[in-house]
Amino acid sequence: MSTNQSLQTAQADGGGVPDARQLRTILIAVSIALMAVIASVSGLNVAQTHMAVEFDASQSTVLWIINIYTLVLAALLLPLGAAGDRLGRKPMLIAGLGVFGAASVVAGLAQSAGVMLAARVAGGVGAAMIMPITLAVITSTFPEEQRGKAIGVWTGVAGGGGILGMFLSALLVDVADWRWLFVLPVVLVVVALAMTLKSVPNSRETSAHRFDTVGALVSTVAVVGLIFVLQEGPERGWTAPATLVSLAVGLIAATGFVAWELRRRDASLLDVRLFRERGLAGGSITLLTVFGVQAGIAVVLFPFFQAVLGWSGLLSTVAMMPMAVMMMMTSGLAPKLAARIGSRSAMAVGIALAGVGLVLMALLVSVDGGYLSILPGMLAMGIGMGLSMTPATEAITGSLPREKQGVASALNDVTREFGTALGVALLGALLANGYRGAIEGRLNGVPQEAADTAREGVANAVEAAGSVGPHARDLLHAAQQSFVDGWQQAMWAGVAVMGVLFVYIAFRGPKNTPPAVADETEASEAVAAR
């Protein structure tokens, strides 16, 4: 762990360690706050058509309404995480919940796309105030022997919360109105705010250095530029002027950020020298990759459920739940496994299982086999991701000192956001290219106009099949089989990525916890339980 900030100390209200009951309340409070943020990332995806009709908005505007939240969230995580360390984590969490809750109310009542966009921007600001602080509260409040379990719960919510949020959002759209999507985060915010005010202690950093304003601004520009490329590249084209300019700005800003932080050294926003340590580097790369693969898998799964199997949006989200449940369960079990075999070994086991899940989905998937042909792979993926994410998160937070936990948590969150955007862009592109290549030779006899529509994607092909009369069955079969071919290409690419990650972690991952330390941890947990 870095000790560069020797002049900095963490201060906590009350000074004492919270008892077991208060610790449980703290964990529930930050988990509910985190759930509100995560659910809002994916929830609006199920309401795209409704927003387009009600606001008379283009598809591009609708996508901006969805993506602007994630863009603002990712860009402000590091600066606001660092600000929370200095100003106090409890005040920052309370303020974030207030901003986020108010933004959700405005979004639910919005009568135009402009108001909705503004509300989503404000929601992203509030989310960036909340998300890093939830993990920082855990790492700065929980005793070391209980911290792993608490991080496991946090990781499970962060990993499975998106799928759970999408399910609840689809349910609300089906049984009520799309505007009810914003009721869920408002309710979660109210509960989290009440529990935070009552039970969450405050902690903050006292620093001998001024806040790194330049680093905060440059990091924001870098993240905006790079995330914009990943979000807009598939739509605008990877060689479009806006994409290339954004890429150049992001790379220049990222390079400038590293150079500036190296110059600031102990006074830096993020001490980039710490990436030389195995824990920080290995944990960050693992989260980047695992979240990228998870997000990419979601991009592949939903069109399979809806266009190939013909399921509704609600049923498609239900079909994703087994993977989310396994991920959340094993995230809680991962600390025990890490205590027995070491963090690096636990991460390697999880990565290997996730890779096996991808192999199963590549080998077993078929149109005729339907959902059961991919369920074993989904379950293995969920288990593997849960086992790898918790020790990776611990490796990141454990590499930075206690007084920098807001920054550590923000880095953890930024890594997840980058991984998600990268996975969606790359695996989505592989699927699309594989589909187009496979369907080309299967459109013989199909009318030209319908064939051109089918080449755009499997959903387009399903829609076009209704207008080709006797060719409908052939077109549907061609599109569905071509989608499976593209699916397999994406899965094998994921297998290759996970294989490289496994080798890296096996040789360069965080050092394993010695058995003696693990035994002491178990003994401490037993004493705490009494």
Image (cartoon, helix red, strand yellow):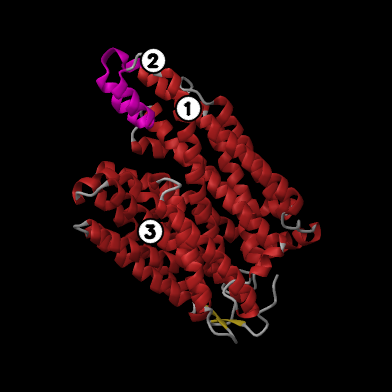
Residue 524 bears which disc, if any?
Answer: none
Is residue 274 or residue 314 the one in the foreground? 274
Residue 284 falls in image quadrant: bottom right
Specify the amino acid type for callout 2: Asn
Residue 464: in magenta span:
yes
Which residue is under mark 3? Answer: 69
- Extreme residue in the bottom direction: 208
Residue 19: in magenta span:
no
Q: Is residue 139 above or below residue 171?
A: below
Image location (x, y in percent) of residue 289: 59, 49
Image location (x, y in percent) of residue 304: 43, 31
Image location (x, y in percent) of residue 326: 54, 43
Is residue 298 or residue 500 the one in the foreground? 500
Specify the amino acid type for callout 1: Gly
Which residue is under mark 1? Answer: 437
- Range of the magenta residues? 447-474
The mark lying in front, picked from 2 and 3, is: 2
Specify the amino acid type for callout 3: Tyr
Does residue 21 appear left or right of residue 114 in this picture? right
Q: Of callouts 1 and 3, which one flags the residue occurring earlier in the amino acid sequence? A: 3
Q: Of callouts 2 and 3, which one flags the residue occurring earlier in the amino acid sequence? A: 3
Which residue is under mark 2? Answer: 444
Residue 473 in sight here: yes
Mark 3 surroundings within 10 Å by alpha-carbon count, few (fewer than 14), some (14 through 19), many (20 or more) = many
Is residue 39 or residue 210 the one in the foreground? 210
